[in-house]
Amino acid sequence: MTVLRPVRAGNAFEETVERLLQAIKLGVVAPGGKLPPERELAVQLGISRVTLREAIRALSDAGYLDVRRGRYGGAFVTYVPPKPDAGDLRQAVAEMGMAELSDALTFRLAVECGAAQVLAASGLTQEQRAVLVRRLSDLNEAGLDDYRRLDTAFHLSIAELTGSTLLATTCADARSRVSDLLNAIPMLQVNLDHAAVQHRAIVDAILSGDPDAARRAVTEHLEGTAALLRAFLS
């Protein structure tokens, strides 16, 4: 879980809430799923268990987590992304502003293209190849309710497989900036079919060790997503 990286000591509570909320909204921990054990999570975030408990309590009070005690207890995700709705999309864009939206899409394009290029040039191990293929297979088999979460997992896996924590966390941040917008796009089968072809092209380029083709495939895919956003906003 790359998004659950160490936080800065000066704003430990606030950043812990941010990290956990990012993991929840990106679907790193699926609805109904459980966060890692408290001891493990505190070490991963580089914070005290007291700070972690405070952050979990805040997210529980806000309705994102359900904290259960006992042998089979833990912090379980209760957040479920709202159903896709063009009206919600317009509202989210209005709150963000067109300039910030354009900046976020440019940022995402730059970091995801870079991640794909780096991975394609790295000479993947058999295990890395298997992970990438499995992520694509999971996405292709996803139902509508789980599509966005597995789409996120697929995209973030490309950065994570590079082995660069900085790149992986940057890609997660870039995805977070547009996550609510992507979740609000109505899912039409023709668009999902087109995205499946583009995802396959990205994977094929990476597996064949062609950085330029990987960059072109990611660019085509993300520019298509941007065009879809504009279409629903027009």
Image (cartoon, rainbow, N blue to C red):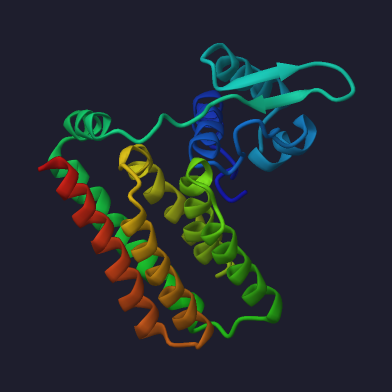
Question: Which residue occupies the extreme left position in the image?
Answer: 234
Q: Position of residue 221 (x, y in %)?
A: 32, 66
Of residues 103 and 225, the one drawn nearer to the viewer in this rendering: 225
Question: Which residue occupies the extreme front position in the image?
Answer: 189
Question: Which residue occupies the extreme top position in the image?
Answer: 61
Residue 164 visible in this rendered orientation of the protein = no
* Number of numbered callouts drawn: 0
- The residue at 53%/48% (across/down) is 143
Of residues 57 and 164, the one drawn nearer to the viewer in this rendering: 57
Quarter of the image with the C terminus is top left
Q: Tell me: 43 left or right of 12.
A: right
- The residue at 30%/42% (across/down) is 185
Of residues 209 and 107, the one drawn nearer to the viewer in this rendering: 209
Q: Position of residue 85 (x, y in %)?
A: 30, 33
Q: Tell me: 124 left or right of 188.
A: right
Q: Position of residue 106 (x, y in %)?
A: 24, 57
Residue 105 visible in this rendered orientation of the protein = yes
- In the displayed structure, 51 sits above or below 196; it is above
Of residues 107 and 210, the one drawn nearer to the viewer in this rendering: 210
- The residue at 69%/42% (across/down) is 44
- In the displayed structure, 36 sits above or below 51; it is below
Q: Tell me: 178 left or right of 120.
A: left
Q: Quadrant of residue 218?
A: bottom left
Q: Position of residue 152 (x, y in %)?
A: 48, 51
